[in-house]
Amino acid sequence: MAFPAHDAEHATQAGLLGRQSECAFLGKMIKAVRARESRALVVHGAPGVGKSALLAHVMDTATDLRVLRAVGIESERELDFAALHQLCAPLLDRLNHLPAPQRGALETVFGVRAGAPPPRLLVGLAVLGLLSNSALERPLVCVVDDAQWMDRVSAQVLGFVARRLPVESVVLVFGTRERAQELHGLPELEVTGLSDADAHMLLDSVTHARFDQQVRDRIVAETHGNPLALLQLPQGPAVGEAAGGSGLVHADSVPGRIEQSFMSRIAELPRQTCLLLLVAAIEPVGDPALVWRAAGRLGVTPEGALAGGTHGLLSFDVRVTFRHPLVRSAVYRSATEEDRRAVHLALAEVTDPQADPDRHAWHLASAATEPDESVAGELERSADRAQARGGPAASAAFLQRSVALTVDITRRADRAVAAAAATLQAGDVEGARKLVDIADTDARTEFQRARCDLVRGRMALAAGVDNEAPRLLLRAAQRLEPFDAVLAHETCLIAWGAAALIAADADSLELVSRAMKELPPAEGAPHALDLVIKGCALLVTDGRAAAVPVLRRAVTELADLPARDVLKWGWVANCVSAVLWDDEILRVMYSQAVEVVRTAGALTELPLYLASLGMATTWAGDFDGAAAIVAEADAVAAATGVPIAPYVRLRLSALRGRGAEAEALIADTIEVAGAGGQLKGVAGAQWAAAVLYNGLARYEQAMSAARAGTRTAELWVSVWVLPELVEAAVRVGDEETARGALERLAEAAEECETDWAQGTLARSRALLSQGAAADRLYRAAVERLGRTRLRPELARAHLLYGEWLRRERQRVQAREQLRTAYEIFVSIGMEAFAERARRELLATGESVRKRTTEASSSDELTPQERQIALLVRAGLSNPEVGTRLFLSPRTVEWHLRKVFTKLSITSRRQLRDDLPHGELAPEWGFKG
């Protein structure tokens, strides 16, 4: 069997040699998509090992299906959405079938229309919908070769889509050298070298020199059976040396030797042919007309370039394609700098600056031999367009090149700091650091230096350098004050949030708070930002008594906070309602903030807001609702790749009182948060432990955990844990500790006349009181907490009152309180506290059967099915549910059919009766 090395078709056959099992596996994928199933696969392996041959086999066997193809191009790695545009371009006529937000997102990123940058995940959902809609007519096969060279945004979007294809009649296959992070978790097929027998067969078919057996064995071993390496060997200049045993390929240099072989062949081609190959290598679209026009500018003609052929390295069809990706690389590397610049200039001249201004600017920049302000200006405008499309990586690339081409130092400083900000937004902290260093060196004005400080502060926040971020952001705010007071004040508040909510760093918190207190007052009536800044500062410098009146005024202003401000500093403002101990405001603010962030599509920030809403939901005792919020936050975090702290899950597990499960999560959180210096995370875990152990009546452990939770500069958990410390200390007989905790609790709650604050305070005071005073305080606690939504807190007031009454030998009254506590605990799923109440009831002489939360058919639902059912019950349509949960409408429909089957219902209306109404009522942030 012979494989002429210059014949691309035969080279493909060589790549499939011995690949029966791989071809059979891929054949099953095609069969599955014909049966209206979906599959995703990452085919990975070394260069030349046969990945492209296998992908070609997929396309050849799918002739009855619709096939879409994209190829990652090294020179386009910095252009966001480039690979995605290649893949989706044939489907753009179907954009009208998408919901308006998704259609607008794709039109914006593909440059069809101008608009604000769409959220990355909205783009992913739009592509999922586009592929799903196309597959309704005919199953779809999507092939992406050289995925290692895809731009990062396209890789993220396609990875997102590939993970959500359970019922879409779509196959999505990636070919890549390395397993990229963006494709992590997808099914994989590793392609390795040929077996020794197949490798020997291929080597024999392409070599004319006589190799002795030992040399042949060594060639096969050192190439690891790489088909392309074996095919290229006879094309190299050292065949005679190889036949004698010298000049052999080493395994770690196979890709380089393959590329070197191509370079050797290119060096022998005529000048015009080499220039044509270089134009094709640099032109990323593969447009034959564009390639020939650019080649013509260089004096290249078809007759001159193709007279001797291209030796199978290049083919012209609907697109210009190279035989193998390494050919493109070899062409580019073998060219001189002068030739590369000449080709870029020719391509710039034939690229329409109106229709494709960004590629025009990029080619001009690559052709430049010295700084050029006109080109730098074009790149800056391209960066603005890229940012508008939601492509921070492309914006960063344009600005970085613009910096290099800028002569004027002041202008270069402006562009460098803008490039640093864009680079940071794209996720490259180290790259941003280098650019902000350039900006710092070139800065000629105080405003430029202030902008540099702002980027450095954001870098520290993004990198998790918690103790450094508040101080850097504060310095930036102080420098920005003379130039942009609003930006300065926003930055100052974010610095406070970094110190109080993330780092829990007492020194930084004090420093930032004093600086905020000294900010000049706003002109006219203070706005929400001014009031939040003043209240947060007073909270630290003067105490809660001074802060509470200001924060009460802030709450009124925050009710109508614009979405822009919610997205910039709303995460800090959310703390106001918690300081005021107002559960109603807490619920409303958190729900509204979640809806604003959802509507804006700010999915990177959404888990933080969902965590706040989840905590509010646990305070209300809606554990199923909180679990659904946790599941949604997890889904968003998985889709964005941004991890979230398990605060809601910790609180939920502690209140449920499932000892082993909760203890494992608490221990893991303390270890991880402690190692990372996340003091808030440690405090949150200690609070959860105190609640858990009080429920389990393990009071020594509860007191130890609660004490640890109070030893932090964190302003909320360190207060919420105080009632746990009072209760645990009283139970172990440590009155001094209990009174100390009560004193701190009074300082935090006494100024707040809310039922939550006064009910909690009365309950804790009752524990340290006697006789009629204790009775009066317990009754006040029950009355006050009974007027809130805080069912767990109310049930605990009944429990403590009942326990006190039993010890006072008032058994009849004790049974009434304990029975009420027990019923509430059981109904909301607080298992440990329910058992504690049951034991107290038994001690009063009452016979009580141990019960658990009532089971229902809805318990059979998976977490995702429950989420979908709850959202549908709340009135959302399938497309709206899909948008919320990053699923296509068809996938939602598929899950909903399973829900109907498990619940034995036939309509959406019946969900109102079959799902418990305690579960995630629409008012908890799930309105569409």
Image: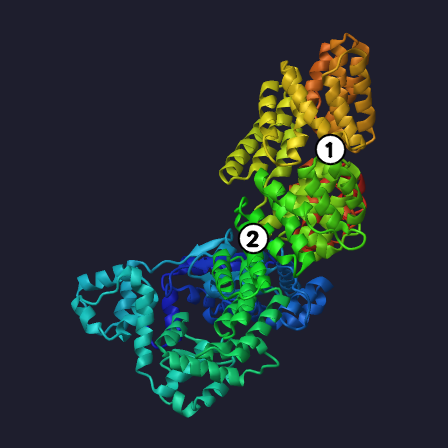
Work out whether residue 394 can be spotted: no
User: Where residue 895 sits in the image (x, y, percent)?
Assistant: 68, 48
**Whether residue 330 is situated above or below residue 16 in the rendered picture:** below
**Whether residue 252 is situated above or below residue 271 in the rendered picture:** above
From the image, state whether disc 2 or disc 1 is nearer to you: 2
**Whether residue 440 is situated above or below residue 76 in the rendered picture:** above
Distance from the alpha carbon under mark 2 to that under mark 1: 39 Å
**Left or right: residue 128 compared with residue 756:** left
Specify which label sits upstream in the sequence, 2 or 1.
Answer: 2
Q: Residue furthest top?
A: 809
Pointer 1: what residue?
621
Callout 2 amino acid: Gly
Pointer 2: what residue?
457
Residue drawn 31% across the image and 80% down it? 267
Callout 1 amino acid: Gly
User: Where residue 282 sits in the image (x, y, percent)?
Assistant: 45, 77
Q: Which quadrant, please, contains the N terminus?
A: bottom left
Q: Nearer the viewer, residue 479 or 301?
A: 479
Residue 448: quarter of image = bottom right
Residue 24: quarter of image = bottom left
**Left or right: residue 58 compared with residue 821:** left
For the residues labelled 2 and 1, say whether their Cβ atoms are less than 8 Å apart: no
